[in-house]
Amino acid sequence: MADRQVLESFKLELGKGLTLGRSSASANAKALIVLGITVAGVLILAEATRRRRRRSKKVAVEHFGAFVERFELPPSPQPPPPAARHTLADLKFAISDNFEIKDYVAGYGNPDWQRTHEPASRTAVVVSMLLKHGATCVGRTVMDELAFGVTGDNSHYGSPINPELPSLAAGGSSSGSAVAVAAELVDFALGMRDQEIEDRQVLESFKLELGKGLTLGRSSASANAKALIVLGITVAGVLILAEATRRRRRRSKKVAVEHFGAFVERFELPPSPQPPPPAARHTLADLKFAISDNFEIKDYVAGYGNPDWQRTHEPASRTAVVVSMLLKHGATCVGRTVMDELAFGVTGDNLHYGSPINPELPSLAAGGSSSGSAVAVAAELVDFALGTDTVGGVRIPASFCGILGFRPSHGVVSTIGVLTNSQSLDTIGWFARDPSILHCVGHILLQSSSVGLKRTRRFILADDCFQFLRVPMQKTVHVLSKAIENLSGYQPMKHMNIGQYIMTNVLSLKEFVEPSTKKQLCTSTLKAISSAMLLLQRCEFKTNHEEWINTVKPRIGIDISAHVLAAVNSTHENMKSLYKVRIEMRNALNTLLKDDGILIIPTVTDFPFKRDSKKKMIREIEDRLYTLLSIAGMSGCCQVTIPLGKHEDYPISISYIAAHGADKFLLDTVLDMYPSLQEQITIASNLDPAPDINGDMDAAELLKEKGNAAYKGKQWNKAVSFYSEAIKLNNANATYYCNRAAAYLELGCFQQAEADCNQALSFDKKNVKAYMRRGTSREMLLCYKEALQDFKHALVLEPQNKTALAAEKRLRKLVG
């Protein structure tokens, strides 16, 4: 092909409309271009051959073909203590081949560019900024030549290997940077953003640098080309993958094992020196602990789970009292943990710092607000950890992560140096795996608590509260009962309806109670307590932080923003009533429990929910959580969360509540009976359900009739017994289960009633009574959507059923 044809072809492909200048320069231009094509062809063939030969597994594992050049640019020195370490300390990053480094030549993805340019006289601004903040640059990565292209392939340096699927392209133009991050070779990387500069302009600037003596036209073209190069570098987009994003996307096993996303900041506060022998060593010697992001440390800024809070506040002038006490007794503080923003929320997810990974089951939420502290303990990163509990911030994550969690009596442990959410509800709690450590930490922090070990203990089981729990009694109540039987000084467990007791003794609560039937008494009472608790929290949060919220307008997560908005829009009209409920609740619980009583309730109503910070928390689930948490929350009594193993792979727990001020007594009780509890948990987990026995049908019918007679006589327990015996003889009769469900409803045993209706419907899909009774059970358990569906099913079968029509109308209002 003639030179002129080669030149025309080259111009059509690379620079449509590109003018090479006057005819006098044409010959030189043609010669240079032909020579360039020839050399480029040789280089391309050589590089392609080399790339094919070096695709060994070792190279792929080492760097996945991501780098053009490896080097190390050290970060700025760390500031001396007690100043905080640099933000990006210990993180490594890479840069695309178009970022300048002083004394290096940026190759722009092309060896000819690198060959014809001088080393840079300065380092790119963005790179200098990252080095200044503690990151280390470890090399320059492959990119599409001249920042063109979408495949990420480079004819000179090869194609970086996509770690997700090696047979697929990595994509361009910043392919090497993306691969370096995805392959975990670096923590983050910089690349270039496409600015859609016209081909002609880029080619002109490139040829001005490459082809000395090649005339492109007037002198103004040269200036424009150089300007475009500067503009191209200036508009380079920074593709920094922040640590929180990296944690969400990679979820590598190594990272999970190291810290499970529990920490916001790692540091070490050494304990007080050990006393010289023969004095005893400090009580907490050799133990490590972590603190939530709302505990102040001198010369550090407590972030309160939100970067905007941290940005707008000064370093603390003192260390929180409880932290100082623990350091004084020999423990070492190793960092600050993730929490729900502003101590709101129940999921433990944080928009800015990510979602700590629940070691019990990574797909589940860790629970909040003190999620990071719970995860740090459950993952054995620390021996114990501190968090705050306002409306469940310690108890929820302790339950979800399967560890011990203690919420002390309100006002017993000092909150000086801890950021406030709601002063009437805030308490400082702690987590531990070992009951002896929980006990030891408690006896250090509870110095003003005078109630100690008692010879006798009374256990009161709140039967109505256990109707919310979707776990077999065999794994909860039965375990507790057996554990108590084996211990001396423990009285047999008594049963009561705590909802009825509270309604009778907390008269000021009536202002917050919704109209209900006798069957709904427990549900409506606990809902009223939780409503009062949340109103009190909102009003006090507004007083404490409304000015900051309105001034700073912080960026907060979707769930937290709903809480903050509700707080800022709240009014103080019924504050006196709220404080009165709080006082009466404490008096009622103290009267019931005295100094030797322990109330047993489930910690939470639901299994841990799925871990997904992108979805909004379902209000119905959140409301159910608060119903049980409000008992200790509003009374200010102490509560301990105790893990009871697992059910269907979900961690389960129960809680003990003792009178206000009986904290040491409660901790002593847990330490004393924990071995017996563990023994019974093991036995219960190994038990298989007893097989049902098919018996004589006439005998079963006779037992059913006896059950019906007992039911009509309002002898509900007897009715349940007769129906149960009938089921043992014939376990495939829908009527027996449906009738027993009716008796359970009268007793307020909603969980059992629902289970019986499920069984009845498995045998008879058209059993209207089963749908009606299951709907009632679910309504009592606050599962309004499911209840609505049941009554709809009943209406399909019996369209004129007045009870079902009324229930559907009522539930539509609750759901809608």
Image (cartoon, helix red, strand yellow):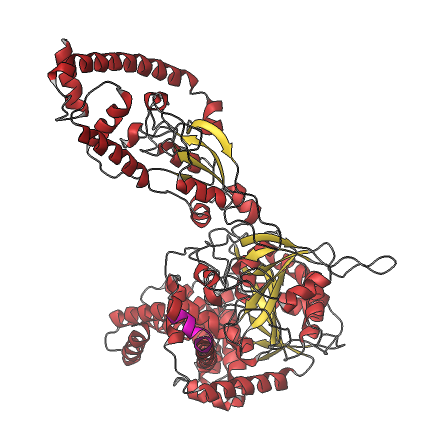
* Image: 4 above or below 799: above
The C terminus lies in quadrant: bottom left
Residue in the foreground of this view, choosing between 178 and 371: 178
Q: Is residue 477 magenta?
A: no
* Image: 535 above or below 691: below
Image quadrant where residue 589 sits: bottom right
Residue in the foreground of this view, choosing between 617 and 205: 205
Q: Position of residue 247 (x, y in %)?
A: 46, 47
Q: Position of residue 411 (x, y in %)?
A: 61, 77
Residue in the foreground of this view, choosing between 253 and 804: 253
**Residue 477 seen:** no
Q: Residue furthest right?
A: 278
Q: Residue furthest bottom?
A: 507
Q: Residue at (43%, 18%) from the top-left corner? A: 54
417 vs 21, left or right, is right
How many marks the image carries: the answer is 0
Q: Position of residue 236 (x, y in %)?
A: 32, 40
33 vs 335, left or right, is left
Image quadrant where residue 279 sits: bottom right
**Residue 670 seen:** yes
Q: Residue at (45%, 41%) from the top-left corner? A: 128
Q: Residue furthest top?
A: 1
Residue in the foreground of this view, choosing between 394 and 342: 342
* Image: 72 above or below 443: above
Q: Residue at (47%, 89%) from the top-left corner? A: 576
Q: Residue furthest front?
A: 219
Secondary structure of the magenta portion, mostly?
Answer: helix
The N terminus lies in quadrant: top left
What is the magenta range?
Answer: 541-550
Q: Position of residue 235 (x, y in %)?
A: 30, 41
